[in-house]
């Protein structure tokens, strides 16, 4: 009787590998939040953390986690929004150097926030000022780049994208100059707070309500972005080709810019100017998963969230009771990892 040769196990399909990667990123994001709840000046066993989340009564654990939970959730939302905004802008502008600050929206929000702080405003008013500054800068961006946003000539699409990018860069440069003036005129007592805020600081993230609002904004903009992911895939091949395949290039470009601006503005109101994450998180997942925006956008969200949560955990615990700006930690750890992966590619 003939003996049948064993059938080799088939290799995972690309779709299966991508699903597995997304599951791994989601697990890493959840694990980073749990680690943020457990690690600090008062270390908590993971069992007690999980028990508290399940509703067990523990007064000491409750007192600690009620302080850590808003900060951990805010860090998650901040990193996720930065990852999403960076991925959208890099695809929309077809520029690998684009990040959430390239449109100048974050710079405008920072000017408004530090201006309010210099006038003696409370932290809550500073957050409100940052939100209004982001909105005002977005309106200015649309006004200055009106022809680029509202052009109906598809053949000028590439030039329109460049106009948007350059307009944002100029707004960001102007905002940077105004920030320098504010810092120069600030008092010594205000200067430390301003510098920490400009470097990215989650020390003021103590409100669970604000954290939940940020997560809701994240969910809304992510859904809106994913609905346009197929169109964004076509835009990566050029505006003309996207137009011939039925994409409303003008409307898609406007919507994606608004989504990116809302994401960046929300980040600034919650954590100040956390740099680097919006640039590197999309690159990291792109090296592994490719450039399909249907997969890349949620992957960049999870990678950015994990990066900021872990960085903030290190920032508040490594030299406790002294806390480092979270933006400094993201750069110190993220840059070497990114360069290592880039060399291996």
Image (spheres, rainbow, N blue to C red):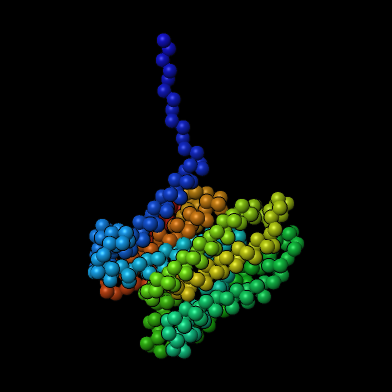
Task: Kindly tell me whether residue 146 is visible in this rendering.
Answer: yes
Q: Is residue 189 left or right of residue 185?
A: left
Where does residue 71 sit, x and y in percent of width and height?
37, 69
Q: Is residue 62 rendered to the left or right of residue 271?
A: left
> Picture quarter containing residue 193?
bottom left
Disc tally is: 0
Q: Position of residue 8 (x, y in %)?
A: 43, 28
- Residue 31: x, y in percent? 35, 56
Q: Residue at x 48, y 51 (%)?
A: 287
Q: Is residue 308 above or below residue 188?
A: above
Q: Quadrant of residue 199?
A: bottom left
State left or right for residue 65 relative to residue 224.
Answer: left
* Residue displayed at 45% across by 86% down: 121
Name which residue lies at 57% across and 79% down.
174
**Above or below, comparing residue 159 to residue 197 in the picture:** above
Query: Where in the figure is residue 34, as x and y percent of width and height?
Result: 33, 60
> 19 or 325, which lies in front?
19
| Furthest residue toward right | 153
- Snapshot quadrant of residue 75: bottom left
């Amino acid at each position: 009787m003939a003996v049948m040769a064993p059938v080799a196990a088939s290799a995972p399909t690309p779709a299966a590998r991508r699903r597995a990667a997304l599951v791994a990123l989601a697990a890493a994001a959840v694990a980073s939040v749990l680690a943020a709840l457990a690690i600090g000046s008062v270390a908590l066993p993971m069992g007690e953390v999980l028990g508290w989340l399940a509703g067990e009564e523990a007064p000491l654990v409750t007192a600690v986690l009620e302080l850590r939970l808003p900060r951990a959730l805010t860090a998650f939302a901040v990193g996720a929004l930065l990852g999403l905004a960076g991925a959208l802008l890099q695809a929309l502008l077809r520029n690998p150097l684009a990040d959430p600050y390239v449109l100048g929206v974050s710079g405008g929000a920072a000017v408004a926030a530090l201006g309010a702080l210099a006038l003696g405003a409370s932290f809550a008013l500073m957050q409100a000022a940052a939100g209004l500054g982001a909105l005002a800068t977005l309106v200015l961006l649309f006004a200055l780049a009106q022809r680029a946003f509202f052009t109906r000539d598809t053949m000028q699409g590439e030039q329109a994208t460049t106009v948007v990018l350059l307009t944002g860069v100029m707004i960001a440069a102007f905002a940077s100059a105004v920030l320098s003036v504010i810092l120069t005129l600030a008092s010594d007592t205000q200067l430390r707070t301003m510098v920490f805020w400009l470097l990215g600081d989650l020390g003021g993230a103590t409100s669970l309500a604000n954290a939940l609002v940020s997560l809701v904004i994240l969910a809304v903009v992510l859904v809106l972005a994913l609905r346009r992911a197929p169109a964004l895939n076509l835009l990566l091949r050029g505006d003309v080709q996207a137009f011939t395949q039925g994409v409303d290039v003008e409307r898609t470009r406007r919507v994606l810019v608004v989504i990116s601006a809302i994401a960046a503005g929300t980040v600034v109101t919650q954590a100040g100017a956390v740099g680097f994450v919006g640039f590197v998180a999309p690159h990291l997942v792109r090296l592994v998963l490719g450039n399909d925006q249907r997969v890349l956008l949620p992957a960049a969200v999870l990678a950015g969230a994990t990066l900021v949560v872990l960085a903030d955990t290190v920032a508040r615990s490594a030299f406790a009771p002294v806390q480092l700006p979270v933006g400094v930690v993201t750069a110190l750890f993220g840059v070497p990892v990114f360069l290592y992966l880039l060399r291996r590619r």
